[in-house]
Image (cartoon, helix red, strand yellow):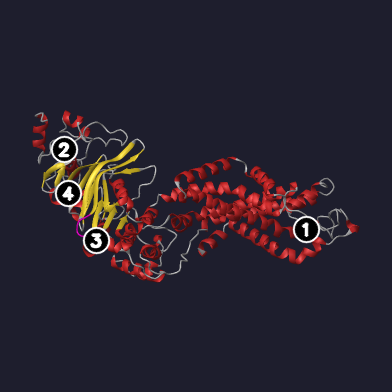
């Protein structure tokens, strides 16, 4: 951070802003001490004189030196502007964060109120509030601060919305972090930079607004004075002594420019990092552990007729499956088939306007929607696709891992960090103690994905949901991550739900494969049946599209013609019929349900056979 500031200060804008800020700060501190008495000294023999050697800007109606009064007014003018800016920033951040914390209806009311307030010019709103709060410095500070709050609130809402969808925020939700803690620890630190920059620019606007209110007589009152009052006093003599009016105006411009230039400089270097200041707590009994052990060896996850809808679109349509304790289940399919939405739904990470319904959705034998966050935070782990967005970039990796144990296992800050180091060591992160003190950008992609898995091991997970965990990694690191997931499964006796578009990755890691297409499971088969035993034409097409060592490089790669249907425009019958060369009229009219096709094997196809030739025979034979 220090290097960035030095580099910024070497630029013309940075150097100019630094000089101006230092000069303004020095005047604000020293001017009242050095020249306070001289500025208040009256001289009846030198009333309303013009500029002279003894009075560079002339004197006012009581013979006081205008130049000294402009210098002394720096403290009050700058102090009031900064105070108003801080009030506006604080109020704006609270209003901007409120929709994410309050119930949905109240949140919408806050958003609407902010939108209406932003439509009014800030100075007009400040004048209106000044009348309400009354004449004087206190009323003016409140008026200007609250008039600037809507713009900060709108900025906070926009920035918070862009961060709320990041993977590390979803991971925090899975860990059971409360809304208020989520806002203060994970979202606010990541939107601090633009807020700080806008606050510096807002200070210049507040300075101008304050000068305007004092000029109108509803701001600073006698015997106090700021640049606005001096400007109003000097305006009466603008034709006889222009310097009396121009000097405070120039002071407002120069200080406003200093704030704006400082904001430009801060844009490149300023960030906000928050530190956890919670006192340590003694370990408490963990209900999650007892709940975990009580589920026995049955199904960890049971899903029946799961549907996820966003208005008229239903990208997940009637998905049903189970994941047994210690089992590894892979979910494959093209992009848009509903794999990730299914994973998010079983992790309770679908938020409005998404609507999740199911005839049965149970985790460890209890309904998912009533499962306490404490249980989910310690028994359900989610590994997201992009490790670079899965961690909060403003917090150290070790502290992020430790948060799970602090939140749900009642460990003290030190004990939680020690466990985080141990978990990093368990996932083969080299020098874990040093790595725990580093930030996410100091990790490579593969190392960060290991740390993400380590976060899931902070408690005792019964189910690990891995959503495309190897997509952004090279082949060597992919293999390491897959091996690590297998180790976690064996060591922790955890079930794994692995989402992937790469059917070969699933074949290497899982016991069972769910093939999804257009929001439905079209085939559920043991991984051993992938090679020659797949019954659905779509599953066969996916396998055929994967090149092997014996693939003829002189021939074009196999592809599946066409594209999947849109979620809001599903056809009648089988959704794959338009792309299937074996489809019959029956396929286009009636959507088949999953039906047994062998031991541990289910398929949703009217003609589930083992060879394409048999499919052709049955389809052309008009089987009904």
Residue 548 numbered mark, or none: 4
Q: Is residue 296 magenta?
A: yes
Q: Secondary structure at mark 1?
A: helix
Between circles 2 and 3, the one closer to the viewer is 3
Location of residue 412 with respect to 191 vertically, above or below:
below
- Which numbered disc, 3 or 4, marks the residue that appears first in the sequence? 3
Q: Which residue is mark 1?
A: 69
Between circles 3 and 4, the one closer to the viewer is 3
Considering the whole magenta stretch, tell me its main secondary structure.
loop
Between circles 4 and 1, the one closer to the viewer is 1
| Number of dots carrying numbers | 4
Residue 136 vs residue 455, the one in the foreground: 136
User: Residue drawn at (26%, 61%), measured in percent from left and top?
Assistant: 292
Between circles 1 and 3, the one closer to the viewer is 3
- Which numbered disc, 2 or 3, marks the residue that appears first in the sequence? 3
Q: Which residue is mark 2?
A: 605
- Which numbered disc, 4 or 1, marks the residue that appears first in the sequence? 1
Q: Secondary structure at mark 2?
A: loop
Residue 220, image x and y in percent?
73, 53
The residue range painted magenta reads 294-299
């Amino acid at each position: 951070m220090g290097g960035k500031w030095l580099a910024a200060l070497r630029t013309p804008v940075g150097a100019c802003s630094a000089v101006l800020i230092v000069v303004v700060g020095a005047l604000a501190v020293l001017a009242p001490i050095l020249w306070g008495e001289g500025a208040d000294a009256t001289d009846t023999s030198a009333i309303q004189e013009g500029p002279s050697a003894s009075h560079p800007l002339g004197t006012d109606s009581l013979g006081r030196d205008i130049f000294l009064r402009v210098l002394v007014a720096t403290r009050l003018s700058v102090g009031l502007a900064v105070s108003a800016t801080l009030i506006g920033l604080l109020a704006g951040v609270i209003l901007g964060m409120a929709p994410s914390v309050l119930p949905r209806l109240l949140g919408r009311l806050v958003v609407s109120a902010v939108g209406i307030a932003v439509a009014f010019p800030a100075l007009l709103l400040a004048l209106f509030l000044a009348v309400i709060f009354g004449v004087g410095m206190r009323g003016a500070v409140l008026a200007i601060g609250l008039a600037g709050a809507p713009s900060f609130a709108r900025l906070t809402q926009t920035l918070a919305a862009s961060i709320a969808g990041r993977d590390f925020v979803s991971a925090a939700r899975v860990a059971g972090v409360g809304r208020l803690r989520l806002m203060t620890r994970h979202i606010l630190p990541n939107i601090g930079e633009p807020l700080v920059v806008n606050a510096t620019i807002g200070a210049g606007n507040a300075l101008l607004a304050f000068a305007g209110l004092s000029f109108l007589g509803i701001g600073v009152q006698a015997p106090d004075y700021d640049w606005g009052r001096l400007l109003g006093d000097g305006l009466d003599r603008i034709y006889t002594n222009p310097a009396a009016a121009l000097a405070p105006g120039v002071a407002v411009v120069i200080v406003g420019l200093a704030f704006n230039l400082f904001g430009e400089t801060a844009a490149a270097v300023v960030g906000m990092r928050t530190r956890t200041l919670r006192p340590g707590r003694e370990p408490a009994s963990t209900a999650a552990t007892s709940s975990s052990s009580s589920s026995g060896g049955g199904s960890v996850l049971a899903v029946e007729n799961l549907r996820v809808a966003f208005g008229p679109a239903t990208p997940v349509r009637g998905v049903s499956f189970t994941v047994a304790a210690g089992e590894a289940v892979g979910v494959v399919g093209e992009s848009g088939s509903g794999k990730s939405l299914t994973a998010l739904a079983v992790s309770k990470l679908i938020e409005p306007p998404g609507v999740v319904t199911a005839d049965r959705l149970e985790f460890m034998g209890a309904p998912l929607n009533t499962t306490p966050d404490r249980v989910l935070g310690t028994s359900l782990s989610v590994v997201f696709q992009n490790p670079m967005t899965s961690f909060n970039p403003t917090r150290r990796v070790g502290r992020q891992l430790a948060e799970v144990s602090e939140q749900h296992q009642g460990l003290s800050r030190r004990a939680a960090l020690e466990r985080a180091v141990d978990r990093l060591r368990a996932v083969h992160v080299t020098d874990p103690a040093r790595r725990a003190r580093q930030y996410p950008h100091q990790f490579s992609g593969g190392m960060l994905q290991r740390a993400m898995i380590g976060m899931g091991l902070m408690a005792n997970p019964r189910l690990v949901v891995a959503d495309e965990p190897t997509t952004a990694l090279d082949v060597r690191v992919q293999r390491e991550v897959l091996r690590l997931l297998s180790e976690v499964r064996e060591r922790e006796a955890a079930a794994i739900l692995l989402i992937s578009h790469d059917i070969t990755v699933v074949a290497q890691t899982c016991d069972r494969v769910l093939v999804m297409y257009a929001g439905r499971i079209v085939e559920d088969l043991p991984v051993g049946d992938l090679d020659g035993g797949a019954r659905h034409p779509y599953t066969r097409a996916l396998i055929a599209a994967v090149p092997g060592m014996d693939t003829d490089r002189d021939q074009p790669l196999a592809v599946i013609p066409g594209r999947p249907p849109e979620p809001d425009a599903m056809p009648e019958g089988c959704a794959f019929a338009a792309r299937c060369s074996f489809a019959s009229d029956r396929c286009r009219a009636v959507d088949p349900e999953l039906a047994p096709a062998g031991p541990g094997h289910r398929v949703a196809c009217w003609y589930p056979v083992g060879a394409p030739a048999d499919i052709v025979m049955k389809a052309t034979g008009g089987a009904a």
